[in-house]
């Protein structure tokens, strides 16, 4: 009577070990996230309304809409600028800007933004 009980207990223990090994094999590897951009915003850009941004920087190369927010990407000769617009009253306004490559002490490189702005001054907005 005790012998079938011991055999059943041993089978249960082996099944539990096998199930645990299968669970640990299916765990996905964790990937480290890139570091967050440095804090700070370029002077005069946060708060620009979408119409002001279009006049200053021209037509964006890409507009991505996510719900009520938008991301506008501008392509320069050696960099890209990303403007993040959020609802502000009846329009959208810039809340954050980043450039790739990034600035050394803030998320947006001023020279990149100046180059894109100068390029927009040459190209008329239609």
Image: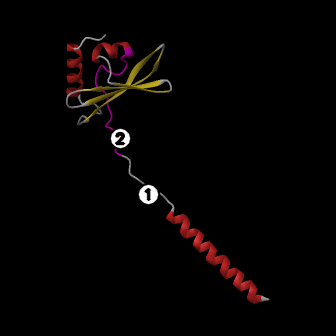
Bounds of the magenta segment: 34-50
Residue 26 seen in the current view: yes
Residue that label 1 marks: 29
Q: Residue drawn 33% across and 38% down?
A: 37
Foreground pick, 125 / 53:
125
Classify mark 2: helix, strand or loop: loop
Name the side, left or right, on which 77 lies relative to 21: left
Q: Which element is circle 1 on?
A: loop
- Contact between marks 1 and 2 (CB within 8 A): the answer is no
Tag of residue 36? 2
Q: Could you say which quadrant of the image residue 57 lies in? A: top left
Q: Distance between the residues labelled 1 and 2?
A: 21 Å
Residue at image coords 64%, 77%: 13
Q: Quadrant of the C terminus?
A: top left
Nearest-to-viewer mark from 1 and 2: 1
Colouring scheme, one of rainbow, by chain, secondary structure, one colour: secondary structure
Quadrant position of residue 99: top left
Q: Is residue 113 magenta?
A: no
Neighbours of disc 1 within 10 Å: few (<14), some (14-19), many (20+):
few
The answer to whether residue 49 of the structure is visible from this angle is no
- Label located before the other in sequence (1 or 2): 1
Q: Where is residue 79 in the image (x, y as percent from the top left)?
A: 23, 31
Residue 40 falls inside the magenta stretch: yes
């Amino acid at each position: 009577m005790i012998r079938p009980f011991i055999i059943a207990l041993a089978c249960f223990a082996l099944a539990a070990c096998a199930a645990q090994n299968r669970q640990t094999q299916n765990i996905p590897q964790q990937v480290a996230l890139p570091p967050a951009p440095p804090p700070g915003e370029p002077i005069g850009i946060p708060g620009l309304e979408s119409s002001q941004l279009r006049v200053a920087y021209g037509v964006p190369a890409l507009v991505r809409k996510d719900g009520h927010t938008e991301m506008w990407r501008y392509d320069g000769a050696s960099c890209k600028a990303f403007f993040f617009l959020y609802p502000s009253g009846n329009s959208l306004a810039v809340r954050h800007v980043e450039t790739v490559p990034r600035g050394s002490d803030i998320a947006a490189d001023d020279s990149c933004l100046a180059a894109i702005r100068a390029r927009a001054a040459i190209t008329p907005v239609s």
